Amino acid sequence: MLKNSFCSSPWFHLRLTYDGGFEECRWFKNPQSDVNIATTSIMEFYNHDRMRSLRSDLLGGKSVAGCSSCYYEDKFDKVSGRKRQLLKSAIDVDNFALTARSSPHYAEFLHSQNTQGLSQYHIADLQIDLGNICNSACIMCDPKASSRLEQDYIQLHKFNPVQFAQPEHYRSWTRDPETVKKFVQEVANFKDLKYIHFLGGETLYDPAFYSICEQLIESGISQNVIVGTTTNGTIYDERVEKLIKQFKEFHLGISIESVTELNDYIRYPGKINEIKANIDRFLKLRADSKLYISLRITPNVFTISQLDLLFEYMIENNVIAESCNILYKPECLRIELMPPEIRNSIVARLDALIEKYQLSKTNHINIRRSDLISDVIANNIIEYRDLIKNYTVPTDVEVLRQQLVTFIKSFESIRNNTILDYLPEYEQFLRAYGY
């Protein structure tokens, strides 16, 4: 059925990755990197064979391998990237047939169906990965996205090559001023461009972020474009205050996994007290600016145990909770591996939180409006409670739990820390698998 596999994203969106390679969308998993912005324009890739093939497959009702992360989230009834993109086309999965026909993009879907996947539409939404310059080495990250983690992987590969592949060093596309200039010139001519989301590395640490934003301002399009970026919260740069005023809106996502020192272990070597202080500074900017702030979470087998504390922090600070995704890779960190006693405990604590604040589910999904923040937080809390309560334990859970132990012990061997300092309640569970 189309409702279970179709996505409208490739008609208005694509992603530019760390080394300048193109990907079909921000959530797409594609090992290919054969098309690069150094030699191919954005619009040339927009109707490249890969994009045309993807559109044709989606229109034909195929489940596309590259869309696996979204299908994985759909399985848990979470708001996946696919569902978010469908909403941008005014398509509701629960009323798919009717809303697809009434979608403003319906005529374009028909056009692509009759032209082997070609599209005459225009890019409205871009994700731009600037490179891997980063001051953090989060354990669930990829060395392609963190220069600091890349250095860790070089060490880790020596004694655990199975779980830690030798990182492939590359040159970020933003290091080439001519390529950046060409990119800005092309983007400035996109008449339907509405949103650009920048990722790093750590964007607020990367000079390319400020340079590209300034060039977009100089091009004259900034007042019609929403800019978003995701930061690890370790940096507060006053240049951001100036950028906020120049764009139609500025969306700042702050990646955080816990409001306790557990965050220091997961998002090493950040310090949670410094991060919360920076969050406070950003929150103070909301009142008199076009700034929208969200705390972006990707719970794993460890941080899921403190999810109630993080959600209560969001409620108390009136800051939107945005669930990026359910952690999919590395598999040994997935939340389905948690021990039953932790699972039962977090369900009970989330139930208590729901009762304490009298929360109920609404139809609002990641809406960046100040009057809907509490509704969106409530949705996330209830969705995660239901997910944790109802997920099915993987058939290979025993193998994955053993991999979890070797994975974290590898990191701890070069960081001289231990997860038990942060989560002593996990000791019996981890010891049972060789910790």
Image: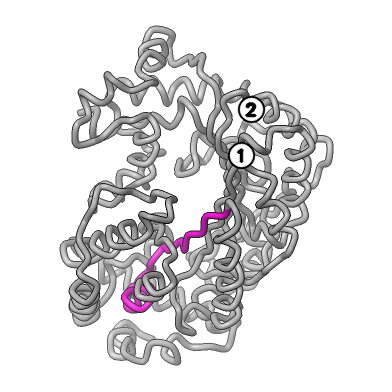
- Callout 1 environment at 10 Å: few (<14), some (14 to 19), or many (20+)? many
Whether the residues at callouts 1 and 2 have beta carbons within 8 Å, the answer is yes
Q: Quadrant of residue 114?
A: top left
Spot occupied by residue 230 in the image (x, y as percentages of width and height):
57, 57
* Mark 1, residue position: 16
Indicate which disc residue 169 carries: none
Q: Is residue 395 visible?
A: no
Q: Is residue 218 magenta?
A: no
Q: Is residue 197 left or right of residue 392?
A: right
In whole angstroms, how far apart are the C-alphas of marks 1 and 2? 9 Å
Q: What element carries label 1?
A: strand
Q: What stretch is highlighted in magenta?
A: 291-310
The quadrant the C terminus occupies is bottom left
Nearest to N terminus: mark 1 or mark 2:
1
Query: Mark 1 belongs to which amino acid?
Result: Leu
Quadrant of the rendering where the N terminus is positioned: top left
Which residue is most to the front? 288
Q: Name the residue under label 2.
A: 42
Tell me what residue is drawn at x 62 percent, y 67 percent: 149
| Foreground residue among 228 and 232 | 228
Is 13 placed left or right of 432 in the picture? right
Image point 43% across, 56% down: which residue? Answer: 370
